[in-house]
Amino acid sequence: MEFGPSFSAPVMAAGAVLWRGAGEAREVAVMRAATGEWCFPKGRIRPGEHMTAAAVRAVSESTGQVVRLGPWLGSTSYSREGWPERADYFAAEADSGAADRDDLLWLAPCRAADALSRPDDVRILYGLERRAATGAGCFLLVRDGSYSTRSILSAYGIAEERGADRERGLRIAGESFETGRPAAIRAELEIVQELFGELCRRRLGPAPVEATVPDGGLLVLHGTHDRIVAVERHLA
């Protein structure tokens, strides 16, 4: 009997490069896993859970920290007990103190790179300085529809969405980027694309990003008063 190529659907996980401090005093959290490896805090994504919400939950449960989610940093793929796994990582700022633990170290980025067990995790760490700007705000542009965005909104600490036209949307986004407080609006696709284009024109942005948002999709913009640090496209 002949069989075709084998395939195992990967286990999906999410986590974060958790950081505190600023400049030369910035430190990142490195944890000792049950396998003995040193890695970033992460956990498996639960059924129906958005990866952003999974990252916040897993990191909070693992470290005891209240976290503020930042930009996506990348993903790693590996095998555990012969089964493929993929982990997506975000930047996350620690918003609260927690008791010291033997399985968690706060290290300067250069020391964390030496402590990490997997080279791919070091690659993720290098993305932190490129994408995670201290004080960056987070603004979500949600395409109007009947789907729920509660999971992803909760990940950024946004209680509800506020409908807006172009001018109101620009004002809400400006306040978010100026204060660092996350905000979101739900609008028709045309308004979402128009706001995205205008926000990128008013601030120094990253490389051109596809602004097409399918039904059930949204754009997440991370930025400051004068710069768009990163843009993500998600499905709710």
Image (spheres, helix red, strand yellow):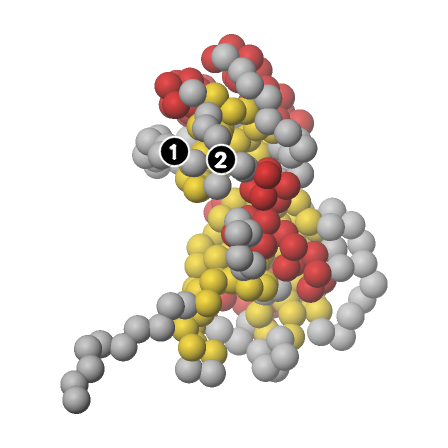
Q: Residue at x 36, y 34 (%)?
A: 214
Say whether residue 207 is left or right of residue 125: left
Where's residue 89, x and y in %?
A: 51, 56
Asked whether the residues under the numbered discs 1 and 2 touch, taking CB atoms below 8 Å apart as contact, a structural biologist would say yes
Where's residue 29, x and y in %?
A: 66, 62
Q: Residue at x 52, y 31 (%)?
A: 140
SS class of the residue under badge 2? loop
Quadrant where the N terminus is found in the figure? bottom left
Say whether residue 210 is left or right of residue 138: left
Answer above or below: position of 48 versus 4.
above
Of the image marks 1 and 2, the number of the one nearer the N terminus: 2
The reply to whether residue 172 is visible in this rendering is yes
Mark 1: few/some/many CA within 10 Å (<14, 14-19, 20+) = some
Answer above or below: position of 117 versus 92.
below
Say whether residue 69 is left or right of residue 63: left
* Quarter of the rendering containing residue 79: bottom left
Q: Amino acid at mark 2?
A: Tyr
Looking at this view, name the residue that lies furthest to the left: 2
| Residue topped by disc 1 | 215
Q: Residue at x 47, y 63 (%)?
A: 12
Where's residue 141, x and y in %?
A: 49, 28
| Residue topped by disc 2 | 147
Q: How many marks?
A: 2
The dot on residue 205 is none
Looking at this view, name the residue that lies furthest to the bottom: 1
The reply to whether residue 230 is visible in this rendering is no
Looking at this view, name the residue that lies furthest to the right: 99
Where's residue 99, x and y in %?
A: 83, 63
Q: Amino acid at mark 1?
A: Asp
